[in-house]
Image (cartoon, rainbow, N blue to C red):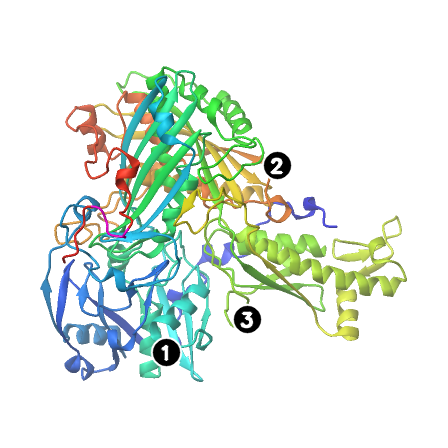
Amino acid sequence: MVDPADTVMNFRRRDARDKLTGRTRFTIDRFPAGLLHGAVLRAGVASGILRKLDVSRAATMPGVRAVVTAGDAPGRIGIGIADHPLFVVDRVRYHGEPLAAIAADTFDQAQAALAAIVFDIAPMPAVLDMEAALAAEAPLVHPDWRSYEVLFAGGARGGNVAWEATAVRGDVDAAFARPDVTIVDSAFRVGRQNHVAFEPRAAIAAFEDGRLHIETSTQVPWTVRNGTARLLGIRASAVRVTVPPVGGGFGLKFDLAIEPFAALLARKSGRPVRLVNSREEEMLTCLFRENAEIRIRSAVTKAGEILGREAVVLMDCGAYGGEQIFLTTMTAHTLGGNYRVGATRLVSRAIYTNTAPNGAFRACNGVYNTFALERHTDEIAAAIGMDPLAFRRRNVLGDGALGATGQIFEGDVLGPMLDRMAELRADAPDLVPGDDGRLYGRATTVGTWFVFVGPSAATVNMNADGSATLVTSGVEIGSGSTMQALPQIVAGVLGIRPDDVVVRSADTDAAGYDVGVGGGRTTVSLGAASLKAATEVRGKLLAVAAAMMDVAPDDLVMRDGRIERPGANRYGYSIAEVAARAQALQGPVAGTGAFTGQGVKAMVGCAAGHFLDAIDIPVFAVHDCDVAVDRETGHVEVLGYRVVQDVGRALNPSAVGGQIQGGVVQGLGYALHEDVTIGSDGCVRQSGFETYRLPLAGDVVPVAISLYEGAPSSGPLGTKGAGEVPILNVGATVACAVANATGLRVQELPLTPPRVLERLLGRKPDLAFPHIAERWADNLLHPHGQSTGSGDGG
């Protein structure tokens, strides 16, 4: 058996020195011999009909080696629905949509050739926000939506509603009809957030021996492989994807991006092609965290029991369904999490608009639903005259609680975590207003996230020198999972040092299938597969060592680089000696492992249109912060921040602490600074760092951290994902603290100074969404599939 304690240590990242000194070579730093430079021509309107596209002159420009358009990429991709072509075929759906791509000897030549392309786009009416998209007789972003291939059955669709998922449990109407309940109705809005990864999306493609080889900065090598093949109409096995170190992802690179363009150009030119987004392209076509609108109603007794809850969440997916189709599932587990509710029904809809597509972003869907749910919780407490913290303690999920889809939660976790937070708060300085005239507030919030498990594979090869090589499709995106957690797991099983475990970079030709790095799944899914693979190697080595010592394998221990019999004389051999002997007798020593979710059960009939009816590994968080609000400017300063995070088991406490500190700072950007606006032409107005306000060094707040261990988990050695959840509660916690400081109803993020000042001066009314019906049932699609309030015209 493996002692979990053998895997726990503050193991330093082996890639840290090279990254700090600039020696790491990211995709953007690679320039293979003979490469061509790629560039993409993009549409300058939000909606229109492409009447003409002539690339003949561009193809003859100096240095041009290849030009590709929609005819070179016949396929469509998507999640749930295949609605997304690589290039504009006949209809432009967003400002910046690709029209053509060119490869030339130099980047300047590629740009000159783009300028020589002749095209004509007839502008069409555009819908730039969800209210416009859902209006009666709104033009359809996809007039031919019925013809699209459906890749996953179950979601309702219609008009400008790309996908609808619902969760129903219990008799909500009866709960709201009771005479002894208070009904609290809340509305919230959040904006988009840009990932701003320091390394933009980049890819290098080559056509070798009849196959495509793509080096790319991605989180999902297998998605790139399969999606590129689908778009190009070729077999997936004809595409190989390798991944150098990735300079930041946060979900931006959890999708297919520019790789197919580079692949097409490489195949057509016969030369390697490098394609890198400019910072402006990255800002304007980034797969933003989606903007959303949320309405929640709850029926609550005077004693604080939540008898019923219904909610509608509208998610702007932009011009194509993309990741938001999948994220409609998650509303049931984020907005429907945190608290015990007697009966619940939720609807989550992804809405097409003529804007750049949105995508996954750290704790996707959960960040804004936690903001809405926790602000709604404070409004409930105020309405029934109960202390907000006491209300939370009374209602947080505990052992045997039912989720929105009827899954049964195990263990009492959030209650003890609130107790732990009380200890952190007791150690914090008292929040005493000064003589500066600012308003001071404090708030505590809870959050429920989950680990997206999915299939993973791993191979461990034991080397004759006593080291091991781990082969997976895992990608190092900066979190450290492949540099720290995975080597620690393998080393703990084999009794060697983590430094003696070499982790191969992702290569779809060498490693088995993996969903990708995201959703807090790397340590759990890849870790479980690696644990199984290492355990197989351990068994083989113990068998050989037992024969060498004429004892039973169970009589031996593997520790500190040796296999020996326990006792004072330490009789045995080094692992290197045993590995060399095993290799000589039996050939190379290797082990394989695979893992996927166990499949937690939901209640039959509760969920419709969901990709995940229940969550395998819930993860909980409790956050607390202090803020000061300047009455004259609206500026919000975060004075102190505290986190209690459910980690299952922390293999590397210092690494988890780093994730929490970084996640909180990123969440402060979402809560206070990062504001995205879209002009009347459909173009994002924040095109660079000059206009997009990120948290700066002066905005960083030290975070007091307490890791809560021991909660139930099916992850290897009891682990849970630690990278996603730190950002989950930040917007909610800051918003609740600002509301407590000002006495205002905070309904919108980010809380920029102008927005806060407008509320302080009474110049901005409460939010109301007339396009979201008061009753949940009135928001559903009609049974025949046509969207309420959307015509077929376009």
Q: Which numbered disc covers residue 510?
A: 3
- Mark 2, secondary structure of its residue: loop
Which circle marks residue 504 in the picture? none
Vertical order, 6 against 400 (above or below): below
80 vs 67, left or right, is right
- Mark 1 falls on what kind of element? loop
Q: Which amino acid does label 2 sit on?
A: Gly
Q: Nearer the viewer, mark 1 or mark 3?
A: 3
**Residue 729, percent from left and from top:** 41, 35
Q: Which residue is drawn at 88% across and 62% down?
A: 549
Q: Where is residue 53 in the image (x, y as percent from the top left)?
A: 15, 74
Magenta segment range?
A: 784-788
In terms of depth relative to the viewer, which is nearer, 423 or 402?
A: 402
Mark 2 or mark 1, which has the lower sequence index? 1
Q: Between disc 1 and disc 3, whose residue precedes? A: 1
Label 1 crowd bin: few (<14), some (14–19), many (20+), radius 10 Å: many
Which numbered disc, 3 or 2, marks the residue that appears first in the sequence?
3
Distance Cα–Cα, label 1 vs label 3: 22 Å
What secondary structure characterizes most of the magenta part? Answer: loop
- Give 448 or 295, whichever is nearer the viewer: 295
Asked which quadrant contains residue 699, the reply is top left
Q: Mark 1 points at which residue?
A: 272
Q: In whole angstroms, how far apart are the C-alphas of marks 2 and 1?
A: 50 Å
Q: Does the magenta stretch include residue 64?
A: no
